[in-house]
Image: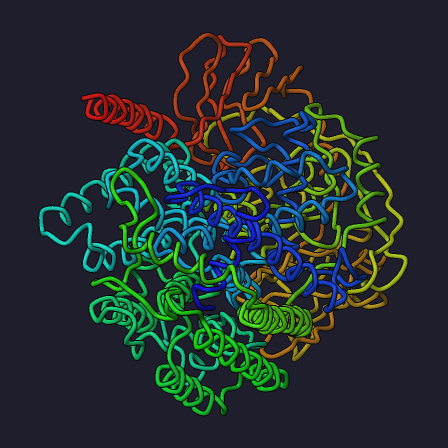
Amino acid sequence: MPPVAETVLDEVEAESGEDAGPGPRTGAPARRGARAAGAAALLTAVLFCLATALSRSHPFGPVTRNVVDLGQQYLPYHAYWRSFLRGETHGDAFLNWNSGFGANFLGDVGTYLSSPVDLLVVFFPADRIELALYVVTAVKITAAGAAMAALLLRLRPGPWPVAAALGTAYALSGWTFNFGSTVPMWLDGLAAFPLLCLVGEWARTGRRPVLGPLVVALAWIANFYTAYMATLGAAVVLAVRLLTAEETATVRRRLAGALRAARSVLVGVGLAAPLVAVVFLGTKTADPTPEVTFAPAAWTDVLARFLPATASTASPALFIGTPALLLALTLPFNRAVAPRVRAALTAAVVLVTLSLQWEPTHLLWHAGASPNGVPYRQAFVLCGLLLIAAWFSVAGGVPRPAALLAGGALLGGLAWAARGSVDIDRWTFPASGAAALLALIAALLALAAARREPSGAVGGNHRDSTGTAPEAPTGDNRENSTATARQDSARTALKAPARPARLLPLLAVLLLVAAQAGEAAVTGKRIEEQQRAEVAWSPRTGPWHEAAAREVARADAWPRHRTDPGEVPGGNDVLLVGGQGADYYSSLTSETTSRTLVSLGFGAYAKGRHPVTLDNPVTDALFSVGTRMRSEPAEPVRQDAPPRATVTATTVPVPPLVTVRPSARPAGPSGDSAFARQERLLGASVYELPAPRRTGRALAAHCPAGSEVWFWAPEYRGTATLAGQRPVRFDGKPPAVSAAMGALGTVPASGEVRIALDPEGRARLPREPVGCLVRARLDTAVDRLTATGATRVRTTGHTVTAALPPGSTGVAVLAVPRISGWSCAAGDADLRPARAYEGLVAVPLDGRADTVHCSFRPPGLRLGGAVGAAALLALAATGVLHRRRSCG
C-alpha cells in the first residue's frame, strides 16, 4: 500500500475534525499504532473463531478440541485453577492435595497457569470450563497479533492497515494452529516476542528503563520456557537494529543500547525469580524422560511448512500466509530499502532458519535439553522475523515489479521443492495459489495507485539513508521538515477530486487482508481436522464428569480419608471432578511420586509423568482411599458428543492418613514385585505369591480358594483372562506407558489358577506376575494400622497435624509421596527435612511426642524470593537515577 493511502486516511481524520490544524501531527503515530493493534486484534479473533467453526470444533461445533495435552493437562489444570481462585480446593498455592496424593502446586502454576490471561477462568461456571479455556486461548492469540502490529509501526512508520494484516499473520501462523492453540501456555511466548522486541527498542533509544524490566518480568512469569526463546529472538532483532538504525550509528551508542537491554533482561528475570526458581528446581526433581537425540527434519519438509494447511510435530511450523511470505522474500531485492538493512535482516532470517536444523543451536534454543515431542517449539520466533522482514519491504510502499518478480520466483521455487513432502495436504496448493493470485492483484492495484499519485505526493518507495523512515515524533526523534512538507503537499494535492486514486489502495489492502484471512482460516480448519484424525484425543466434558463431580462432593471426607474419583475420560481426573486420587499429569511430576506409585502397581503414561488411579484394596489402604468412584459408560466415547455414564461410590474402612509403624525399616517379604512392595509398606503379608508355570500363552498356579487373582506386568500389552472370566486389557508400552496392576477374578474352589495370555508382540512378564489377595489378612492389617494410627488428622493448605496414641514409637508415616519440600517434626521439635519410608513421608517417634506436624514449602521459593528482592531494589535504583537525569 503506497503512502497515498495513509494520506487519504489522514485527510478523512482532518475532515472529521480529528487532528486538525497546521504543522506536524504529534498524536498521529500513537493513533496509528492503536488502530493497527485494534484492527489486528479484531481480525485475529474473528479468523481464529472462523477456523474453529469451519472444523466443527467446540464451542462452534459438536466436535472436541481436546487433542493430546490440551485435554490431558491444560483443561484439567484450568478447571482446578478456577476452583482454587474461588476458594473451593483443599490445597493452597504451595500444595495441591488433589493430584498425585499431594503435589507441588506452585511449580505447576509457574508451568501452566501463571499468565494473567488465565485468570479469566474465574468468570466462567464450572460446567463451561472448555469455553473458558477457548477464550483464554483466543485472547492470548489476539494479544500476540495486536502486539506484533504495534511493534511493526514502532520499528518503521508505514500504513497501519498493512501492519494490522501482518500482525494477524503472525498471530495465526502455522505454529499457532499446529502447536500453540493446543498448548496454551506456549502462546504467552508468542505474545512475548513482539513485546520483548519493543523492550529492545526502548533500550536502544534510552527510553522507559523501568517499564522495560516489568515487561520482561511479565513475559517470564507468564511462561518462562517460551519467554526464554522469545528473549533470544528479541536479541536477534535488537542486534539488527543496533547495526542498521541511524540513532545507533556509533560503536558507543550500540554498546550503550546493548547494555541497557541486558540490564532490562537481568532485572526482569530477577523479578520473575520467585516463580522461575521454583519451576527450575521442580524440573530437576521431576521424573526424567528418556534422552532425545535431535534429528533435523528433511529440508523438503521444512520448506513445505511455509505453505498453508500443513501439520506435523516433526518439522517446524512456519506458515505465515503466502502474501506475507512473498513480501518477506522480496526484501533482499527491494532496492528501496537500504542495503545494510536488507543484508542484516536477510542474514538474521537465514541464520535463524539454519539454527533450527543444527543440533548445537537447537539445544541453545531449548535451554540445553532437546525436548520430547515437538522439537521445533521456537519456530514462532522465525515466523516473527519473517513478518518483520515483510514489513520493512512494504512499509515504504509496494516493492517494485523487479523485487516482486524475484520474490515470486523464490516462492515458486520453494513450493516446487516442497511438492514431494509428506506434510503437503490436498488443500495446500489450492489455498496458496488463490492467496498468491489475490496478492498479485493487490500489488498491481497498489502500484497503479502509486503511478497515479498527484505531483508532490509522497512517492511509492522512499527511505532515508538507512532504509528506515523517520521515527515517530519524540524527544529523541522528530520528523524532519522535508517529511512534513511532503505530507502537506500530499494533502493539498488531494483536495481535488481523485476518487479512483483513493479507492485503488484501499481495494489493495482489502484484497491483501482477504488473501491472508482465507489462507489462515483454511489452515486452521485443516490442522484441527488432521490432529483429531491422527493423534490422541479426549472427549468434551459433560454428563460423565458432572455426575462424578456430584458424587465426589457428596462423599468427600477429607482429611478423614481420601476420595478417589476413579477413571473419568480425559485424564487428570481429580483436577476436573475433585477428590484426592493418584491421577496426576505434569511436566513437574516428581520422580519420587512416579517411581513410588509405579513400583506399587499403579499405571503411568507420558514416560512416567502421568501416574493414574489404581482400583486395588491394598493401595487404597496404604493411601487412605476410603471412598472410590466407579463409572459404567452408557455408550462408547465419541469425538462429537460429551460422554455419559453411571457413577457409583463405595466407602470402606481404611487406616487414617497418618499411621504408626514399628521401625524405620519396613517389615514384610523380600522381593521386587509390586505385591512384595505393597506388603512391606503395609507391614503385613496379604498376598499368596505363587510361582506360576508358563506354557506357551498360559500361566498356571495354585492359590487359596476364594482369593482374588491380580496380574501385574507393567510392560505387557494385550489381554489376560482367568479361566471362566472376561478378558482384562493391559496397555504396557515401555518406556511411554506402564500397565497398571489389574484384577482378573476369584480363585475357584479347586484353587487352580489358569490365565490365558493374548499379547500384542512379545509377552514380557516379571518374575512374580501373579498375586492372590486374601481379604481376611488385609482386613486384619487395616484394623491394626487404624488402632495404632492417628486419632485425629487436621490439614490446612500445605500442612498436616496428627494426634497420635500416647507412647507411640517407631515412625509415623504420612500417606503422601516424599517429594522435595516436606519438613516434619514430632511434638514441639523444630521442623526438619522429612525422612522417607518406602517413598512416603516419615517422622521418627521416640515415645514422648503425641503429635506430629508436617509442612510443605516448594523448593526454590526462598532463593527466588531473595533474587526477586534484589531485582526489585535494582529496579527502584534504576527509576531514581532515570528521574534524576530527566530532571537534570
* Residue found at the very far front of the displayed protein: 496
> Vertical placement of 176 versus 421: above or below?
above
Residue 293 placement, left or right of 725: left
* Mark count: 0
> Vertical placement of 751 versus 586: above or below?
below
Residue 566 placement, left or right of 343: right
Q: Nearer the viewer, residue 695 or 169?
A: 169
Residue drawn at (50%, 52%) of the image: 144
Residue drawn at (47%, 38%) of the image: 107
Residue drawn at (68%, 74%) of the image: 533
Residue 693 in view here: no
Q: How is the image coloured?
A: rainbow
Image quadrant where residue 551 sits: top right
Residue 627: image location, x then y, percent: 77, 35
Residue 634: image location, x then y, percent: 90, 57
Q: Nearer the viewer, residue 92 or 618?
A: 92
Q: Quadrant of the C terminus?
A: top left
Residue drawn at (42%, 54%) of the image: 288
Residue 307 placement, left or right of 276: right
Residue 192 placement, left or right of 753: left
Residue 597 in view here: yes
Residue 745: image location, x then y, percent: 80, 57
Residue 458: image location, x then y, percent: 38, 64
Image quadrant where residue 800 sits: top right
Q: Nearer the viewer, residue 845 or 3?
A: 3
